[in-house]
Image (cartoon, grey):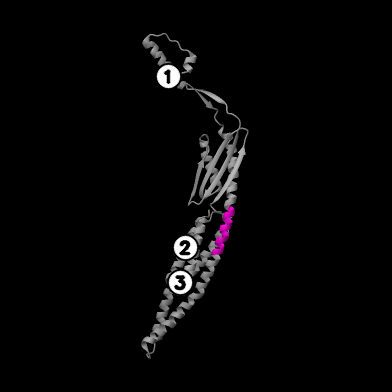
């Protein structure tokens, strides 16, 4: 199923020690960009989070917001800066030797020295936290993908409708095309007759001129390619993979063909139809920018 690049999803999961809430939001982007916002202590898990998101989506900017709640109080740990303590000890011994003071080191006094002891919360078990994040993230991404698929279905229907409109205009151009040459021949013959009066027209020269015009104004190849592109458009929209870039390229090719038709046809009626096709192609281009 064709997917939009716009969507939102939310997931929650909990363990005995943590509750995780994940929100996922995606918008249009030329490529895949993943931005993760979460508590500092979870930063080592960022690559795992991005890897999981990459498995789910291929295009768009995806913002992941992760919040963490702790169930119960964490253990408080006393940390000892052993290197700093040794530095204090050696410095005090040096002072004692310099001033001739007997060495008396009191443990309590040593512990009160700045920075030697510190209180810290027990660090999270990241593997345990990851299992909770993984569950919540999968739930959020499935939710987001469901919304993207729903939006994509609506876009695909709109694009197929516009494809049919363009195809109808192209058929009208194809029907009008043969008349352009015959009308040119008739107008040219009348113009020459007006200029020459009673003098007989050189039919061979007239035929050559009409043949030259027909060759120059022929849009058969462009119409064939344009119809082929329209068939490809239907085929692409029936696929489940990412189609945005393919349709964007196809739209550019169709626009190129219709521009060529407009410049070669040399006909007012075809010119009006070309304007209508270009208008529809512009709407197609805008919609395609929303597709994954």
Q: Along the polypeptide, which appears first: circle 1 or circle 2?
A: 1
Of the numbered discs 3 and 1, the one sitting upstream in the chain is 1
Q: Alpha-carbon neighbours of circle 2 within 10 Å: few (<14), some, or many (≥20)? A: some
Instruction: Using the numbered discs, state the Cα–Cα distance from disc 3 to disc 2 in whole angstroms.
Output: 19 Å
Q: Which residues are magenta?
A: 149-162
Which residue in the structure is indicated by mark 3? Answer: 271
The percent position of residue 244, horizontal first and vertical second, equals 51, 56
Residue 56 lies left or right of residue 204; in this view the side is: right
Local secondary structure at mark 1: helix
Residue 183: x and y, percent?
A: 45, 80
Q: Which residue is mark 2?
A: 253
Badge 3 vs badge 2, beta-carbon distance below 8 Å: no
Magenta stretch prevailing secondary structure: helix
Q: Residue at x 58, y 38 (%)?
A: 20
Say which label, 3 or 2, has the lower sequence index. Answer: 2
* Residue 161 part of the magenta segment: yes
Residue 131 versus residue 186 in the image, above or below = above
Q: Which residue is mark 1?
A: 87
Mark 3 and mark 1: Cα distance apart in space: 88 Å
Q: Residue at x 56, y 58 (%)?
A: 155
The image quadrant of residue 3 is bottom right
In depth, the one of 179 and 20 nearer the eye is 20
Secondary structure beneath label 2: helix
Q: Is residue 3 magenta?
A: no
Q: Residues within 10 Å of mark 1 (few under 14, many from 20)?
A: few
Compare residues 254 and 108 and report the one nearer the observer: 108
Residue 64 spot, x, y in % from top left: 53, 43
């Amino acid at each position: 199923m064709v997917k939009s690049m716009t969507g939102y999803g939310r997931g929650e999961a909990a363990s005995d020690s943590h509750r995780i809430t994940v929100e996922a939001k995606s918008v249009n982007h030329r490529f895949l960009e993943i931005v993760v916002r979460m508590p500092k202590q979870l930063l080592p898990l960022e690559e795992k989070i991005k890897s999981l998101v990459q498995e789910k989506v291929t295009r768009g900017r995806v913002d992941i917001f992760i919040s963490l709640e702790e169930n119960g109080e964490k253990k408080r740990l006393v940390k000892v800066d052993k290197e700093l303590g040794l530095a204090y000890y050696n410095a005090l011994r040096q002072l004692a030797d310099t001033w001739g003071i007997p060495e008396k080191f009191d443990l309590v006094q040593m512990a009160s020295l700045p920075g030697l002891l510190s209180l810290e919360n027990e660090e999270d078990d990241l593997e345990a936290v990851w299992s909770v994040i993984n569950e919540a993230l999968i739930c959020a991404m499935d939710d987001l993908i469901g919304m993207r698929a729903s939006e994509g279905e609506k876009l695909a229907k709109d694009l197929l409708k516009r494809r049919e409109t363009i195809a109808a205009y192209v058929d009208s151009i194809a029907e009008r095309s043969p008349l352009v040459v015959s009308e040119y021949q008739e107008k040219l013959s009348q113009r020459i007759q007006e200029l020459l009066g009673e003098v007989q027209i050189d039919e061979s020269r007239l035929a050559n001129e009409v043949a030259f015009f027909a060759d120059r104004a022929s849009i058969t190849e462009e119409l064939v390619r344009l119809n082929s592109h329209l068939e490809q458009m239907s085929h692409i929209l029936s696929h489940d993979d990412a189609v945005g870039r393919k349709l964007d390229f196809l739209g550019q090719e169709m626009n190129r063909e219709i521009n060529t038709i407009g410049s070669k046809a040399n006909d007012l009626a075809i010119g009006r139809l070309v304007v209508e096709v270009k208008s529809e192609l512009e709407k197609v281009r805008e919609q395609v920018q929303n597709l994954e």
